[in-house]
Image: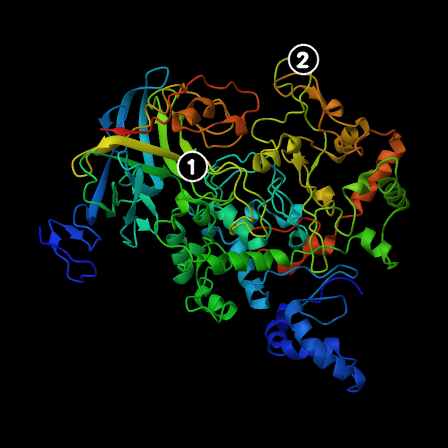
């Protein structure tokens, strides 16, 4: 490796990494292009629009998925040895990624979505060279951050892709659907619509519906997922709702909404929320709290 | 002098002299000291409204005498062009994705802009969990919908309705480009069978005239603003009660006058929630200094949630009211107080249409809360832990007094509003009330 001096402006690019000047060349800061790959699955099988999957929920029922999209933000690499976080700075591509928010879109049309898909987070990590991107922990937060969750979707100049999709916005209630997984359970029989729409609750009254509330929503309903021992280049993060629905009878609905849409008094949310690492205490009216304590189940290393 | 002097015949003339009209409305008219004041008042008057004025002012839209000036949205100063465009859009069934339903189909003029259904139905057949609200005086609403503390202006309300996908109402979510495309390039075929069969409305020109400062006049934002503009002129304040109240010639019966006394009595207490110029405490106007975004629990349900045989004040699962937004159990069953204007035309009643007639509404309040004896919604509303306002305690009322009270409610019908041409269907499809001339 070429020896670098303090203040040097010349840099050398090695294998896609940018080696920056540092006080010492023992552990130089390196900027690396990273692509975090996701793969949508349903009960372990690759996801395809309309395909019927088996073994879903407490009844082991058939389930066809018609929409499968979610927002993530503030992804980072965590190095345990250094106890340091290194953000993944997303490439601003004008389509899927905007500032620190990205839309993962696993469906290629289905019923409500678009033909285009996006299964990666693409960006840059700036970290010491000793941080091993082949064996690290990747973390990200599911949802839209508060400062972007209440945009004026009427204003096309204020709302940029991927935050301009009206099928992912709760127009009558502030905020975005962070996760939209739509499906039909037992399609040839009960044909029960069973969906997961995750979003913020308890958002305070503003002077305007499409304005940032004066105080944060009391139930942001964002959740973090971390994947340990992850090889950024070669590993893939599986996204699978089957594990989130494992405590539910998906062939029937136990609340005013089909499946769980995050609102109060929806007993279908009792088993789903804890499996996203969330607490449904805010919404409990006459349901029973789940005994599940295993943390989020939507993401795992494939 | 009552009501409106809004004339489409003079629409363009009024527009061209609008700024002059504002000046003359403020000045003394004889060019002396008042004129000096008028100059200072011009800026203030100019930002008040280009559309509304008090009765006798000569403004394009004269308010009923005694009504306050509505609050206009800073982003959507109203104009006659926006209003006329909004009227077309409101009645245009191409404003639903599947081209079967318009705003008007749930907000029919003959029912004071509701639909006479217990629960409304969307363009794709989805049932709505709630009863359509009358659009009488919506421009004065502090909040919109039955129990939503987050929608506070008409253009946001329009957006919420068109984009709603649970249930699907007009079905815009995911389809707004296609629907706006119908406005950017209207197709004559889409207007077959209407009074525009000879040629679709010239929406590009209408939008350009209504939104002259927009580089792209046809957009999601401008369409919502046009809807809001039309909604803003649905103002009703010339019922027989109003005329009597202003000492004008009227047909308010003695029975209705006795009913009025009952309504405003401390025995019945109706006016505590249904008071003020719009017969609701949830109002906002240009002169409002405090926010009156109020919601009340009127003791319709008291469901036992934990099975101990004692009502917990719960409402059915799809209609918890304001609690859905605030998450506060104390907001269980709280709903916005609707106006009682034109109430005789807007049955069935309550947020879920669960009370069919005015007589049954009186039963409800005279009892002090509804008793549902059996079924999943069983409970006694009069014993609800959330019935704490102190104003729903029940009252004694004789049969004759009931008739008087109902006569009073009927005296709140404003036939000028219900039959007003400027609020009717420009496409000639939806008919006015049979009683209209």
Which residue lies at the image location 29% right of the left edge and 54% below the top edge? Answer: A92
Instruction: Kindly give the residue lying farthest to the top in the view shown.
Output: B308
Instruction: Kindly give the residue lying farthest to the bottom in the view shown.
Output: B32
Query: How many dots with numbers?
Result: 2
Q: Which color mode does the image show? A: rainbow
Determine if residue B217 is in view: yes
Query: Is the residue marked by circle 1 packed among few (<14), some (14-19), or many (20+) residues within 10 Å?
Result: many
Parent chain of label 2: B
The image shows residue B271, relative to residue B73, as above or below, that is above
The residue singled out by tag 2 in the image is B309
Residue B306, picture quadrant: top right
Give the position of the C terminus of chain B as an image quadrant.
bottom right
The image shows residue B353, relative to residue A168, as above or below, that is above
Question: What's the CA distance linking mark 2 and mark 1?
Answer: 38 Å
Which residue lies at the image location 65% right of the left edge and 48% below the top edge? Answer: B110
Give the position of the N terminus of chain B as an image quadrant.
bottom right
Mark closer to the observer (2, 1): 1
* Nearer-the-camera pick, A108 or A36: A36
The residue singled out by tag 1 in the image is A222
Q: Which mark is residue B329?
A: none
Secondary structure, mark 2, is loop
Give the x, y percent position of residue A87: 30, 45
Give the x, y percent position of residue B292: 70, 48
Determine if residue A111 is in view: no
Give the x, y percent position of residue A299: 30, 30
Secondary structure, mark 1, is loop
Tell whether B177 sits left or right of B68.
Answer: left
Parent chain of label 1: A
């Amino acid at each position: 490796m070429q020896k670098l001096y303090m203040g040097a402006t010349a840099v050398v690019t090695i294998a896609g990494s940018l080696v920056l000047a540092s006080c010492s060349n023992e552990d130089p800061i390196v900027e690396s292009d990273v692509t975090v790959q996701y793969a949508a699955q349903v009960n372990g099988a690759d996801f395809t629009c309309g395909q019927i999957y088996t073994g879903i929920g407490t009844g082991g029922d058939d389930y066809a998925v018609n929409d499968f999209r979610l927002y993530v933000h503030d992804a980072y690499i965590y190095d345990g040895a250094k106890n340091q976080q290194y953000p993944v700075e997303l490439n601003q591509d004008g389509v899927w990624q905007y500032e620190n928010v990205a839309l993962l879109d696993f469906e290629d049309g289905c019923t409500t979505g678009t033909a285009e898909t996006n299964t990666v987070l693409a960006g840059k990590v700036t970290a010491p060279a000793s941080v091993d991107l082949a064996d690290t922990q990747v973390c990200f937060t599911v949802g839209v951050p508060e400062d972007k969750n209440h945009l004026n979707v009427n204003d096309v100049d204020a709302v940029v892709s991927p935050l301009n999709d009206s099928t992912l916005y709760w127009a009558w209630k502030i905020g975005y659907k962070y996760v939209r997984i739509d499906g039909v359970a037992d399609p040839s029989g009960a044909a029960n619509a069973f969906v997961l729409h995750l979003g913020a609750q308890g958002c305070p009254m503003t002077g305007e519906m499409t304005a940032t509330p004066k105080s944060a929503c009391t139930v942001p309903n964002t959740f973090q997922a971390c994947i340990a021992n992850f090889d950024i280049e070669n590993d893939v993060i599986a996204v699978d709702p089957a594990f989130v629905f494992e405590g539910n009878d998906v062939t029937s609905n136990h609340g005013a909404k089909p499946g769980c849409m995050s609102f109060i008094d929806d007993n279908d949310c009792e088993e789903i929320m804890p499996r996203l690492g969330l607490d449904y205490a805010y919404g409990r009216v006459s349901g029973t709290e789940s005994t599940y304590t295993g943390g989020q189940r939507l993401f795992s290393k494939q | 002098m009552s009501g409106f002097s809004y004339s489409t015949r003079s629409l363009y003339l009024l527009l061209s002299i609008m700024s002059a009209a504002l000046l003359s409305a403020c000045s003394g008219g004889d060019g002396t000291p008042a004129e000096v004041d008028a100059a200072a008042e011009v800026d203030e008057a100019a930002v008040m409204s280009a559309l509304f004025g008090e009765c006798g002012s000569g403004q394009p839209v004269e308010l009923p005498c005694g009504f306050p000036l509505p609050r206009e949205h800073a982003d959507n100063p109203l104009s006659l062009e926006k209003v006329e465009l909004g009227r077309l859009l409101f009645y245009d069934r191409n404003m639903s994705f599947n081209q079967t339903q318009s705003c008007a189909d749930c907000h029919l003029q003959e029912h004071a802009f509701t639909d006479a259904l217990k629960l409304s139905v969307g363009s794709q057949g989805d049932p709505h969990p709630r009863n359509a609200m009358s659009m009488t005086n919506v421009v004065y609403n502090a909040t919109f919908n039955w129990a939503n503390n987050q929608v506070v202006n008409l253009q946001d309300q329009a957006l919420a309705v068109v984009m709603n996908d649970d249930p699907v109402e007009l079905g815009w979510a995911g389809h707004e480009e296609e629907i706006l495309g119908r406005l950017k390039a209207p197709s004559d075929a889409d207007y077959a069978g209407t009074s525009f069969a000879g040629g679709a409305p010239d929406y590009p020109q209408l939008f350009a005239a209504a939104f002259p400062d927009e580089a792209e006049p046809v957009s999601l934002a401008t369409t919502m603003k046009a809807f809001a503009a039309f909604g803003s002129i649905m103002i009703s304040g010339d019922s027989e009660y109003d005329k009597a109240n202003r000492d004008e010639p009227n047909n308010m019966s003695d029975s209705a006058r006795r009913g009025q006394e009952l309504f405003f009595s401390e025995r019945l207490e109706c006016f505590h929630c249904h008071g003020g110029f719009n017969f609701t405490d949830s109002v906002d106007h240009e002169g409002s200094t405090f926010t009156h975004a109020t919601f009340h629990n009127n003791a319709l349900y008291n469901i036992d949630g934990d099975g101990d045989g004692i009502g917990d004040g719960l409402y059915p699962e799809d209609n918890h009211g304001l609690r859905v937004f605030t998450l506060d159990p104390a907001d269980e069953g709280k709903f916005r107080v609707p106006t009682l204007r034109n109430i005789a035309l807007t049955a069935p009643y309550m947020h879920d249409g669960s009370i069919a007639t005015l007589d049954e509404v009186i039963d409800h309040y005279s009892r002090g809360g509804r008793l549902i004896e059996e079924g999943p919604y069983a409970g006694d509303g009069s014993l609800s832990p959330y019935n704490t306002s102190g104003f729903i305690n029940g009252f004694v009322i004789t049969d004759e007094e009931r008739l008087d009270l109902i006569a009073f409610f009927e005296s709140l019908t404003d036939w000028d509003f219900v039959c007003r041409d400027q609020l009717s269907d420009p496409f000639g499809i939806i008919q006015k009330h049979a009683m209209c001339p």
